[in-house]
Amino acid sequence: MKIFFMIILSLNVLLANEVNTNIVKTSELELFLFKVGFESLLKDVDATKNKTSLNESEIEKLKSNIEIIMEEVYKNKKVLKIDSSNIVLESSNKNDKELKILKEEIQILKTQMKELISKNISKKTNIKEFAIIRVKFASIRKKPFSNAQVLYKLKKGNKIYIEFCDKYGWCKLKNENKYIARYMFNL
């Protein structure tokens, strides 16, 4: 056993000496490429530094422009107050009457928009409660497209309940995510 241990130890010593003699020195080409890469990295760092300083100068210009605008606003004693839904502009100028008129017009436009939206909703829900299939077989589809998956087919004369129809001729079945083409039934 001691002999075996001595042989292994001597082999390790021989191999260690051999490895130390085979150390690879870097070539001149590798050193040159390293130098070129390092110089390129330094140039990139300088370019980024220059861009940062340019951005800082642009930010300073914008700040000065904002200060000029704010001075003009405060010079005319205009103050913006933001309420929950309305923007109030208080001013000591002669434009108060015009501002009041504009506010009133905006309120009128808001009410008109609400009315239009409610009319559109009522048009969608103002469809008869049921329809009758008029073609031999009507396909009920997963989505409102002609190439959508067909879930099942209904025969002529069957009743279906429609929630609404869109402008493209597809109707949604009531309380379901299924669609049918409008030309397949009579309302």
Image (cartoon, rainbow, N blue to C red):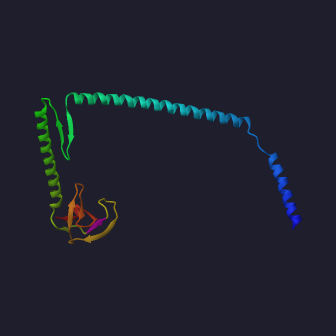
* Depth order, front residue of 41/131: 41
Is 25 rendered above or below residue 138?
above
The quadrant the C terminus occupies is bottom left
Residue 62 is inside the magenta segment: no
Residue 162 spot, x, y in % from top left? 20, 65
Q: Position of residue 122 (x, y in %)?
A: 15, 58
In the rendered image, residue 59, in percent from the top left (x then y), is placed at 39, 31
Q: Nearer the viewer, residue 14 or 181?
A: 14
> How many numbered circles does the render carry?
0
Q: Furthest-right residue in view?
A: 3
Q: Residue at x 15, y 65 (%)?
A: 128
Judge whether 72 appears above or below 85 on screen.
above
- State whether residue 144 is above or below residue 98: below
Q: Quadrant of the N terminus?
A: bottom right
Which residue is at a point 87% across and 61% down the rendered structure image?
6
Quarter-of-image position of residue 81: top left
Q: Magenta residues?
A: 137-141
Q: Nearer the viewer, residue 81 or 108?
A: 81
Residue 90 horizontal side relative to residue 6, left or right: left
Image quadrant of residue 101? top left
| Left or right: 163, with 145 as reference point | left
Magenta segment's dominant SS is strand
The quadrant holding residue 102 is: top left
Q: Residue at x 19, y 44 (%)?
A: 83
Q: Is residue 17 above or below residue 154?
A: above
